[in-house]
Amino acid sequence: MKAVILAGGKGTRLAPYTTVFPKPMLPVGERPILETLIRQLGSYGFKDIAVSVGYLGELIQLYFKNCNRLPKNIKITYVIENEPLGTAGSLSLVSGLKGTFLVMNGDVLTTLDYGKFIEFHRRNNGLVTIAMHKREVKIDYGVISTDAGFQVTGYNEKPELDYRVSMGIYAFEAQALEYIKPGQKLDFPELINILLKEGKKVQGYPSDDYWLDIGRHDDYEEAVKIFDKLKNKLFK
């Protein structure tokens, strides 16, 4: 099975680190997070991995050209985004996407069992399956509910709201690519809404596994701190 890692973003929220390094090349533990992801996918049987690059993509290619730590049976190919096409739009550039394939962001630290994820996707017959994580959002204010005339109907002091958020990991069937026009800039939320409008089945996969998107300074620092405790749980 093929996996696509999206590694073309500028990572502006992690400046100034990302002025000289693409975000997926930031070190977590002894190696870049992208190397850990590739090794992790390899341990789950993904041997054909396409990396979509854009911003500072030549640094990613140069690093892996000279990296001898990856298993020899992992094949890495690159997709060059000359213009940003969005998280979903870049898939139109990837060749050889047939049947079921995995798509994920290149800045994710997670103990997700990819085998169980793909198995769930196939069992539920969705066109796309989105790995989801539960997040609590604390509101620091009293939240007021009103009717159309602004008469107060409720008052909730500092509520905690529960949401399921995307982990940036997706299982795809190739038929979903029919809804991505070549050269069109398209992000995953837009693609998912197109599929839903067309009546296609999009499945959610609830995960309680550890998950962290390192796109912000606080999250990156957390990933660096916790990596040693997690590293033995990342691989199958």
Image (tube, rainbow, N blue to C red):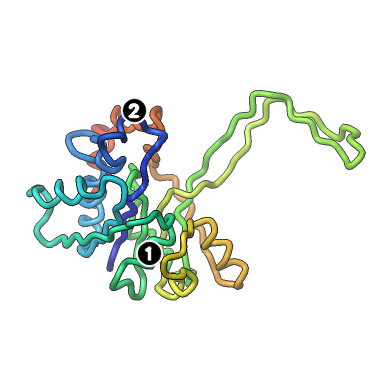
Q: Callout 1, which amino acid?
A: Leu
Q: Is residue 152 above or below residue 202?
A: above
Q: Residue at x 25, y 49 (%)?
A: 57
Q: Callout 2, which amino acid?
A: Glu
Give how far apart the Cα atoms at labels 2 and 1 are.
30 Å
Residue 126 appears in view:
yes
Q: Position of residue 148 (x, y in %)?
A: 89, 42
Q: Residue at x 25, y 58 (%)?
A: 44
Quarter of the figure that contains the N terminus: bottom left
Q: Position of residue 32 (x, y in %)?
A: 22, 40
Of labels 2 and 1, earlier in sequence is: 1
Q: Mark 2: give few (<14), some (14-19) or many (20+) Cα within 10 Å.
A: few
Q: Position of residue 54 (x, y in %)?
A: 31, 51
**142 lies left or right of 22:** right
Q: Which residue is mark 1?
A: 91
Q: Which residue is mark 2?
A: 221
Residue 45 appears in view:
no
Q: Residue at x 51, y 58 (%)?
A: 204
Q: Mark 1: give few (<14), some (14-19) or many (20+) Cα within 10 Å.
A: many
Closer mark to the observer between disc 2 and disc 1 = 1
For the residues bearing labels 2 and 1, Cβ distance under 8 angstroms: no
**211 lies left or right of 196:** left
Question: Foreground residue, 204 or 105?
Answer: 105
How many marks the image carries: the answer is 2
